[in-house]
Amino acid sequence: MKKVKLEVKNITKRFGDLLAVNNVSFEVYEGETFTLLGPSGCGKTTTLRIIAGLEKPDKGRVFIGGRDVTDVPPRERNVCLVFQEYAVFPHMTVYDNIAFGLKARKEPEELIARRVREVAELLGLTSVLNTKASKVGLSEKQRIALGRCLVVEPEILLLDEPLTLADAKIRETMRRELRRLQRELKITMIYVTHDQLEAMMLSDRIAVMNAGRLLQVGTPREIYEKPKNLFVAYFIGSPTINLIEGKLVRKDGKLVLEKEGLVLDATKLLEEAKGVGKIIGREIVIGIRPEDIQIDPSGHGVWKGEVELFEVSGDQLIVHIKLAEETKIRAMAPFSLRLRTGDIVGVAINPDKVHVFDRKTGERIDLLSIGEA
Amino acid sequence: MKWGRIVVTSLKYIIIGVFILWVLVPVAWIITLAFKPYQEWRVAYFIPKQPTLDNFIVLFKPEVFTGVMGATAIVEPVTKPLINSLVVSALATVLAVIVGFFSAYGASRYNTPGPFGIFFTLLTRMLPPATFVTPIMVYYANLGLLDTHLGLIALYSSVTVTYAIWILKGFIDAIPVEWEEAAMLEGASPTKVLFKVVLPLVRPGLVVAGLFIFLLNWTELLFALVLTNINAVTLPVHISKYVGAVGQLYGPQAALALIGSIVPVTIGYIIQKHLVTGFTFGMVRG
Amino acid sequence: MTDRPAPRSIKILANLPLNALLYAVLIIPFLLMIYLAFLKWNPAGGYEWWRAPLIGLANFHKALHDSRFLSSLGRTIAYVAIVVTIEFLLGLLLAYLLLEKFPGKKLAIAIIIYPLMLPPVVVATIFYLMFQDYGPVNNIFLRSIIGEKALGIHWFLRPDTAFISLIIADIWQWTPFIFLIMYSALSAVPKRLIEAAQVLGASNFYIFWRIRLPLIKPLIVIAIVLRALEAFKVFDYVYIMTGGGPGTSTETVSVYIYRVAIEYHDISYASAMSLIVLLLIIIVTRIFIWYSFERGGR
Amino acid sequence: MAFLEIKNISKKYRGRYALKNINLSIEKGEILSIAGPPGSGKTTLLKIVAGLVKPDEGSIVLEGRDITDTPPHLRGISMVFEIPPVYPDRTGYDNIAFPLRLKGLPENEIKKRVYEVAELLGIKHILHRKPETFSGGEYQRVALARALVTNPTLLLLDEPLKSLDAKIREQMSIWLKELQRKIGVTAIYTTHDPLEAFTVGTRTAILIGGEIKQIGDPIDILEKPSMLEVDEYVSIPALNIFTGRVELEDDKLKVIINNVFLEKVIDKTLRERIESGKEYIIALRPSDIKVSTSPSPHSFQGRVLLVQYLGSRTLASIEVNETTIRAILPRGLRVGEGDIVYVELDVDRMRIYDPDSKIRIA
């Protein structure tokens, strides 16, 4: 049985006309990394600041370890926050920065010295302890901000997009380091980011937010493989999921997607799915992830299309294929597949990997469960 | 805990309240005094029983006073000093802001005016005007600039140009160099960049610098006291002479103080926002 | 800042008007002042300064033995020390108290900075009127404490009370100046630094001492230096309120030099004293700034 | 003769090379992307081409004309900066019209061209709004519109997407590439993100420490990096680097890493460049490492330290003999942290670098 460390209940927060956080509730378990993920302005940072006590919710309560802390000032909450811009105290040495929390609590000198050394050791800051914090590099600042929090042993460690300022390389190493550290020290961590890849790499569970609302909470696998709605499907995954919208109708014995006169045959994709009858005649969106599409240079498959553009993604190609005017999909292909723009290729898609959403509400339609109902 | 917080908060409001009273009481006294008739000048209450405008009216007429020990003084009407102050302050401000804008641009982008120019203008701010006015008086006497508007304007703009450079440099520094470089690539020559890109972007800065300098010019006493006599007398000089000459004529003195306050207070409140945020010179590191 | 060389047109615009103005109005008189200080010249003597005899350091020698000059200097320094200390402590306290949001804060700030906008002559007039025998200080405030005796206090006729009245006027007008700088400095301390300290468990008092004050130290130095330099110039209050009196008991350096030059027409001597004062100011400012910034190995 | 030639450009700041001996040539209609880590000299290079920075040495030749000493406003080059030049005091329309007004074009001609370019970039709806209401993407498009409205002979784009969110950046980079194809403008594009550079550019140059380390098409750079630095820079997720002893046997190359032998058939030219018995640097991408739950002849045994599920792929850190190897797990293989797995290195994709010069040998 997992122990609940933090409970956020029906939090709402307004800034003037803007509804920043709209009735958000979730639980965070002890020892896990929980990520609030969403585009800028979705309310994730505000939620985090409410947990830290830096912002007061208009409605709702916050519980830490079962204690209602909604009206408790930040310094009595025993949580710590690592800020996006690190907020390292520039006028102090690295040592004084890390020691700050303990000194503010009037801990004995020798305990402070011991703890600071331990943490500095852990984060590789020992050699710069006596340097002014304004003089060290970006990645050190990051670690100081982290160390400053670790040293006070908070019940929950909060991180607000700590890696956005770092360049790609440092970001990658830091993600791994953070994950390792969190595992080693068994910290409860709440992490905020707009980068879905970062969220996937770091988290035990992810909460996807958009426009102040909490859309879905789940493990990275759940969120990726069973997105609850269109936004989650769109936001998670790089390259972005292919989305094709239209009205599903039956024509001449075929299942087709119709949109503004354009017709796309979806028979092979949806025919075998149970419950497909229930969505005929509805406006839907079909989502297929690029890696679930196989390119067949000989032209066989569900659809046919013209190769338009290539992107290179690390060890694979992302191929843009034009199925019809205004309908393009992206698929992954190995470098070894020698394709040229203008080639006509077929695409194969496993029907099991097709996601279907209601176009109006954006909600996921689970074909199987409809069939069972 | 709760009680402690209440005590601390009320103490805070008490201190703020006392300070506000300390600021307001003298101001309130002057305002009410200015509307009191002769009989009420020495009374121990604020609101005049028979309010009057006589104290103001008298300032606009030439008057002869018989002061202590029978000495007489002729006091000119306040009209001319008022106009002089407006003209001199405004023209000196315009000159300082124009010169300051070009120099601030050079200083911000190319470090042009060089350390000497900056040091020297700073020096003139450090030096008490009393120590500096002597040679200027001699110099102006030789050039025939004593008691002229031009003399005052030239002096005022040269001692305030530092502020113009200082304030405008801050505004120009805030404009990304890239914004100018883009215009340059789009075909603008350096002077076109200055006038078509920088000038419109820095307009709020010109207003702030201008009003601030106008305020300084309007309030200046010593230079004007030494360098003017009849023709170019400014309002502060007039006030100082009036207060000195007419002895215990409290009502008109208060009225004069009010007249002298209207313009600077108006300007002060227009640039209040910049006064509050502008005084850090970017020196707080974060 | 770019590393491109300045185009010629910009160089001309940036340097020519400024230099023309400075040379024509300030630098020539400044050089003239240095020359005058070594002359024996009094315009009342009937000849122009270029015919006056050079007398070397005599004027400087005289100044250093002139007890009226020395005591005006000492008085000015005491004045600066008193007003700057009080204004700094009060201004900082107010800035801190007004930092947090509360209803009516904008109005409170608008009122507090009111004196700053007034011409010093007006402030001098105000306090000249306040401290009259039947002015409100005696007639309302003190009379309610010590009774009718209060009406017998002649503020401007006793050296100590005259000096105090000047100091009160200065504090009234210039505390808002320190307040403004301290307030904008404290507001400019990045909010995240304060919040970081809060989540680390620091109390407000601790944050003030360990985070806010050290971070605004450069501005504290600047505020004090600026204010001290301005206070050293004090002229308007003295000229209007006490006229330097009773006797010469409230005469400041500015007033004394003004008198020597304008009333006694001893231009050379005034120039020499000016140079001494200037030198003193540069040295003291330099030491103070060095002590505050460079000694710490910034 | 190429459209733009950058010849032997060097620039020093305070005695240190910001750019060292840069040579590049760009053909008409192509988009060259320059990728490099922060501080590698990308911006300086673009500014030299634009004429905003004067090089210490070298020359710039545009369409056969040496423009090294031409002032920027006479070069006919447009640049989009990391801080987009969108003036906050005027509307979108006035911003885009600005360069045309500088040229003194009649107002109806200006209007026509502004609307044309706004249509092309899909920003007609914001022409009459002030910049404070723009979103990040709109801001960038207005900046781009300003740069395009003059029909520049050459367009320079300096990290135009840096400040945008990851998701918007992905879309904008594809959009940019499609746009460039449509209008056929010649462009140089810089970015710190190698993948973005590969997406946008027809060719990519890798700029590290002020030097061009490699130039070519994306797949070339990824498959045949010229040196270890380039390999490390373009590898995302991070490269695995080992040291191994190399021995030559007949037509075979044997690599010994931690007592595991790997064999590879090689040709003669390679034999001559490798010294038998010497230690070399061996680099492999996580995708070049096969992980399975059963041992094979050339595999190492290892323990899984960390599994990171990324949706389209799963990344694992595996501890083998006290070194950590990062690998991409095959789809469908599910392993947990602490499990024992077997790791095999793909010999054919292994890259060998000289330990001293760090130049690629094979």
Image (cartoon, coloured by chain):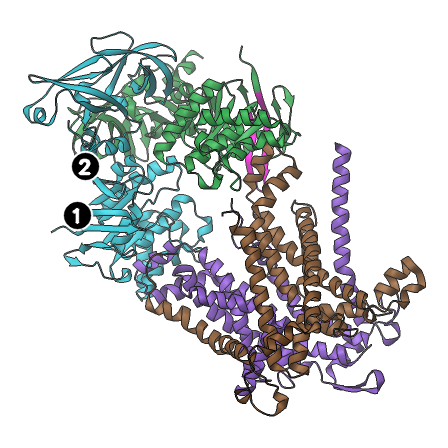
Res B46 seen here: no
Which chain appears green?
Answer: A
Q: Is residue A12 magenta?
A: yes
For mark 2, name the chain. Answer: D
B28 magenta-colored: no
Chain B tint as drawn: purple
Q: Secondary structure at mark 2?
A: loop
Q: Type of residue at label 1?
A: Ser
* Element class at badge 1: strand
Residue at image mark 2: D217
Q: Are marks 1 and 2 on the same chain?
A: yes
Vertical side of D306 occupied by D57: above or below:
below
* Quadrant of the rendered image containing residue B25: bottom right
In the image, residue B252 sits, relative to residue B147, either above or below, namely: above
Q: Where does the image place residue A320, in percent across and percent down from the top left?
A: 25, 32
- Label 1 is found on which chain of the structure? D
Q: Is residue C159 above or below residue D316?
A: below
Residue B89 appears at what percent x and percent y?
58, 74
What residue span does the magenta drawing correspond to?
A6-25
Q: Which of the two marks, 1 or 2, is nearer to us in this view? A: 1
Palette colour of chain C: brown
Dominant secondary-structure state across the stretch colored magenta: strand
Is residue C213 found left or right of D302 in the rendered image? Answer: right
For label 1, count other residues whose C-alpha is less than 10 Å away and answer few (under 14), some (14-19) or many (20+): some
Mark 1, residue position = D25
